[in-house]
Image (cartoon, grey):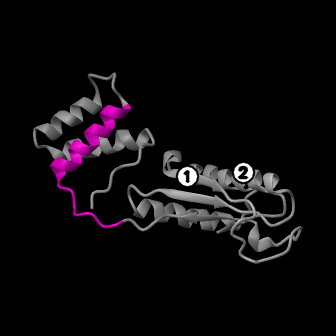
Amino acid sequence: MVFFDWDSTRLSDASLNVLEQARDAFKAKQGARVTATGHTDTTGTEAYNMALSLRRANAVKDALVKLGVPAAAITTVGRGEQGLLVQTGDGVREPQNRRVEITIPQMASAPPMNDQAYCARLARLWRDYDRTTAQGPGPQAIAKCDAGDYASGIPTLEQILTDAKIPLPPRS
């Protein structure tokens, strides 16, 4: 969890460690999704707090993107005053309630994907990303995979997709 000062979306220096841990957990779970859920304390109107909680979630998303998590893999949610960690009355400035919870669901284990199937999956992702290029490293890498040279084709396709900030599919 990342905590915030009252009425603020500014990330503290202490939050960097939490964000780096979230990034590392994301990278360890290829193909995972990240959810950043913002919360507020009970000061302010419901509408204001809902907007503030979403701004906090977006601040966390922006920081995770700067740390290398693809924006497309992050969902932001604002819950306002819903889900208080510390139950309080209305109008109470409770620091524990001003937070963003970062969740990366545990993914079910899939059987390992063989090189041929993995390369085919990468090729589909590349074709969805770039429908205009008939030459260059993408088509050449696909041709290598089609010829059974997965050791050459797969790393090239992975690099192209990573550079385009497209999450790679899980291999296992």
Indicate the position of residue 41 as horizontal and vertical percent values. Answer: 80, 66
Q: Amino acid at mark 2?
A: Arg
Q: Classify 10 Å Cα crowding around label 1: few (below 14), some (14-19), many (20 and above).
A: some
Indicate the position of residue 53 as horizontal and vertical percent values. Answer: 72, 56
Checking the image for residue 140, the label placed there is: none
Residue 122 among those drawn in magenta: yes
Q: Amino acid at mark 1?
A: Thr
Checking the image for residue 75, the label placed there is: 1
Q: Is residue 68 visible?
A: no
Indicate the position of residue 138 as horizontal and vertical percent values. Answer: 28, 32
Residue 65 among those drawn in magenta: no
Residue lying farthest to the left in this orientation: 147
Which image quarter is the N terminus in?
bottom right
Indicate the position of residue 64 as horizontal and vertical percent values. Answer: 58, 54
In the displayed structure, does residue 75 sit left or right of residue 6?
Answer: left
Mark positioned earlier in the residue sequence (1 or 2) = 2
Residue at figure coordinates x 38%, y 58% from the top left: 30
* Nearer the observer, 37 or 22: 37
**Local secondary structure at mark 1:** strand
Q: Please, is residue 88 above or below residue 162 in the view?
A: below
In the displayed structure, does residue 13 sit left or right of residue 101?
Answer: right
- Magenta stretch, overall SS: helix
Checking the image for residue 55, the label placed there is: 2
